[in-house]
């Protein structure tokens, strides 16, 4: 996250939301280190969170905030690592979104925080039940709009918004999980045959659910299975080969854990490590 802020946002005159966005404004106004201003701006949050948060959350907030400030200092001292990309802002936007989004995504996935707006949002949620996403949205909007009046050009403002959009999508991906797949429900008069072929040809497990037709009042066996994206086409082919009139419902599953998905990945990793 610190790498992205220094090498893509600060160097290319892009803005950011939250406390890090304020540190970039202060940098352009007074030349103060983003690491220093980040730590100073978070001191009031430390004091408030000490009284409102439980001890583990408080210490994780301190750890995350100080870590971000330290790495901001480090990357400032090292200087720009990425070559000058002022003539290719598309790469800047992608780098900005991917690095900051991935950094923040990993932090939030482990229930961590870097202080700042996230801490403020949690405090307002606990005190007055104001939704976290609403607080973050308004806070980020105010910071980015303020940047327009201080250093941000119109074109760089558009690039900033694109970068923040990419970062938001990546953060969401970290929270939802990377083992996405599809849940398929199949209603057919040939459920046993379809279930057998799914297990044999697609190599996926199935579960039978039992329902009753609202119009026909007939009892039905409903097949439930979870497949990966690349298996979805093969599954449809298997279903319609047996029963072209079957009713099929497909819905996206954001994260799939367990046998055949995450267990399979863990087994492969252990196998590679052992070798």
Image (cartoon, grey):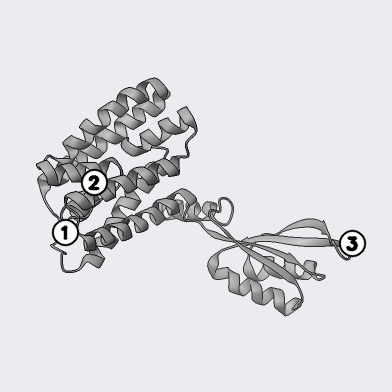
Do residues under tags 1 and 2 come within 8 Å of each other at their CB atoms? Answer: no
Looking at this view, name the residue that lies furthest to the top: 51
| Left or right: 70 as drawn, with respect to 194 | left
| Left or right: 63 as drawn, with respect to 110 | left
**Rendered position, 21 above or below 70:** below
| Left or right: 36 as drawn, with respect to 236 | left
Q: Which residue matches tag 3?
A: 217
- Label 1 – label 2 distance at C-alpha: 13 Å
Q: Which mark lies nearer to you, 1 or 3?
A: 3
Looking at this view, name the residue that lies furthest to the front: 149
Dot 2 or dot 3, earlier in sequence:
2
Screen quadrant of the C terminus = bottom left
**Where does residue 93 sit, x and y in percent of width and height?**
27, 61
Circle 2: element type: helix
Looking at the image, which residue is at 17% across and 35% down?
36
**Where does residue 43 sit, x and y in percent of width and height?**
26, 27
* Foreground of the two, 34 or 207: 34
Circle 3: element type: loop
Dot 1 or dot 3, earlier in sequence:
1
Q: Which residue matches tag 2?
A: 2
């Amino acid at each position: 996250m610190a790498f992205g802020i220094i090498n893509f946002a600060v160097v290319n005159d892009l803005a950011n939301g939250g406390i890090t966005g304020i540190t970039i404004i202060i940098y352009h106004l007074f030349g103060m280190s983003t690491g220093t201003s980040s730590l100073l701006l978070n001191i009031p949050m430390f004091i408030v969170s000490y009284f409102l948060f439980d001890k583990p959350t408080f210490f994780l907030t301190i750890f995350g905030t100080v870590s971000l400030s330290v790495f901001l200092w480090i990357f400032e001292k090292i200087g720009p690592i990425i070559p000058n990309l002022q003539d290719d802002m598309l790469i800047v936007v992608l780098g900005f979104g991917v690095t900051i989004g991935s950094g923040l995504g990993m932090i939030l996935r482990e229930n961590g925080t870097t202080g700042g707006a996230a801490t403020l949002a949690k405090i307002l949620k606990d005190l007055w039940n104001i939704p976290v996403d609403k607080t973050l949205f308004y806070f980020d909007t105010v910071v980015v709009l303020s940047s327009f009046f201080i250093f941000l050009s119109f074109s760089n403002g558009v690039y900033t918004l694109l970068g923040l959009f990419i970062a938001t999508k990546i953060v969401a991906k970290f929270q939802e999980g990377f083992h996405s797949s599809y849940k398929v429900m199949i209603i057919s008069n040939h459920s046993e045959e379809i279930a057998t072929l799914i297990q044999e040809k697609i190599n996926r497990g199935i579960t039978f659910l039992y329902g009753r037709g609202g119009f026909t009042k007939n009892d039905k066996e409903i097949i439930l299975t979870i497949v990966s994206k690349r298996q979805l086409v093969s599954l449809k082919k298997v279903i319609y080969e047996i029963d072209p009139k079957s009713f099929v419902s497909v819905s996206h599953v954001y994260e799939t854990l367990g046998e055949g998905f995450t267990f399979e990945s863990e087994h492969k990793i252990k196998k590679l490590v052992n070798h």
